[in-house]
Image: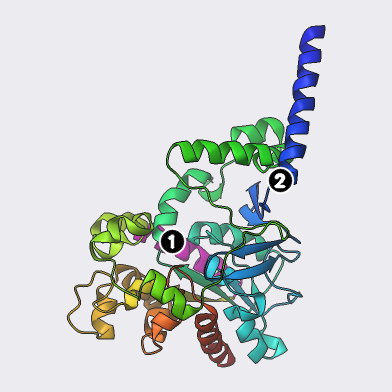
Amino acid sequence: MKKTAIYTTLFIFYALVLEFVLTLFDPEVVFVKSFDRNLLFSMYPNRTGIVVSEEYKVKVTTNQYGSRQTNPSSRPNVILFGDSFSEGWGVEENEMFSQIANQILGPENQILNLGVHGSNPALMYLHLKHYLSLFQPKIVYIQIFDNDLDDLGKFETFLERIENEIQPKVPLAVRIFGETVYNVFKESSTFRLARRIIKKSKGQIDPILYYKENKVPDLALLSHEDSLRKFGRLSPLQNEIETKYNGQFAFYRDAEHWQNLLKTETDYLEKMFALLNQKNIKMGIIYIPAKEFFAEGGILGNQKKRELNRFVLANPHHMNLKSFCDTKKVDCMFVSELFWDQNPENLYFPFDAHWNRQGNKVFGEILAKQLEKLP
C-alpha cells in the first residue's frame, strides 16, 4: 500500500513536470472549452491568440461571452449566431462583417456577435437557449454555411435527448471526475501533443488554430493577387467534390443521399423558430454557399450558362433553406444571390474557404442596409 502511494505520487510529480516543460514550448492557445454542460462547446472568455496562414495573420481576442467583439452591447437588439464566417476567420476584428455593419448602424441596432468556428444549427440551438436567458433582442440571425450539413452528421454523437429536449451528452469522464478536471486534462499540452502524434501516425492532421503571440510561425503573407497565382483562380470542384474539403459539399451532386441531413437542419431551424416565436423575437437567416458555387460552370462545372436561377435551382441547400424561409416568412439573406454580381473571386480568399476583408466589407454594408429597414 505504501509503495502504491509512493509510485502514485512520483507519477503525478513527473506528469506535472512534463506538463510544465511542454507548456513552455507549446505554441498553441486553447480557445475552445472541451466540454460545457450548457453550451457543449464554446470559446473561453478573455483569451488572445494569433490566427496565421499564407493569406492572413490576425489577432483574435475574446470578450466576457467568449466571442470576438470588444465592448459588446449589454442590451443588443440584434444577435448573430454563426460559425467561422461570423467569428471573422482571417480578418481583423474591425474588418468583420458584423463590425462593419455596427459602424454604420445606430446604437439601437447594434449586433451582438456570438459566432464560434465549427458551429452548426444544432450547436446554435443550444447557444440560443442559453443566451435568450440573458438577452431580449428584437431579431436573431442564424448564419448557415454549406458545410453545416456535414457538421450536423458528425455532431449527433455529442447530443442526447432527455424528455424530448436536446442537451449536451455528458462524457463518462465528466461524470466521474467533473467538468473542470476533464477540461484541464483534455486541454493540457501533454494530452494535445499525444493526440497529435497519434493522428500523425494515422496520416491525419490536427492543425493549430490559435498561436501564442510569441510563438507565431514566420510566414510570408501573400497578397490576394499572389495567392491567386499560387493557388489558382476560382474554379469548379467537378469530380473532386467527393474528396476536396473531405466531401463536405458532395450534396451538390447527390442530394438524395443527404436528405436526412437537410431534414435535420430544418428540424433545428424549426426548434429555433419556435423558441424565438414564443418570446416574440424575429428570426433571420444568412446563408453562405461554398465559394465554388460562383465558379464558371457552377460548383460541378456542368452549368452551360451563368444564370443565377439555374445555379440556385441546382443548389439543394439553398432550395431547402428557401422553402423554410418562405413557409415561416423569415427574413433570409442568400449570399448566393447577394454576391452574384459582386465578382465573388475577389470576396473570398483564393485558398482558404472564408471571406477576405473585402467580402466582409461588402456583406457588412448589405447587412446594415437590411437592419436599417427593421421597424
Q: Nearer the viewer, mark 2 or mark 1?
A: 2
Q: Is residue 272 left or right of residue 69?
A: left
Q: Residue 113 appears at what percent x and percent y?
A: 63, 72
Q: Quadrant of the N terminus?
A: top right
Q: Can residue 273 be found in the magenta stretch?
A: yes
* 2 and 1 marks in contact (CB < 8 Å): no
**Rendered view: 372 above or below 240:** below
Q: Which mark is residue 350?
A: none
Dot 2 alpha-carbon crowd within 10 angstroms: few under 14, some 14 to 19, many 20 or more: few
**Rendered view: 79 above or below 195:** below
Q: Which mark is residue 148?
A: 1
Q: Could you say which quadrant of the image residue 304 lies in?
A: bottom left
Instruction: Name the residue at 27% across, 60% down.
Output: 240
The residue tagged with tag 1: helix, strand or loop? helix
- Write the start and end of the magenta stretch as one range: 262-280
Q: Could you say which quadrant of the image residue 243 lies in?
A: bottom left
Kind of residue at disc 2? Phe
Q: Earlier in the sequence, mark 2 or mark 1?
A: 2
Kind of residue at disc 1? Asp
Could you tell me if residue 51 is visible in this image? Answer: yes
Query: How many discs appear?
Result: 2
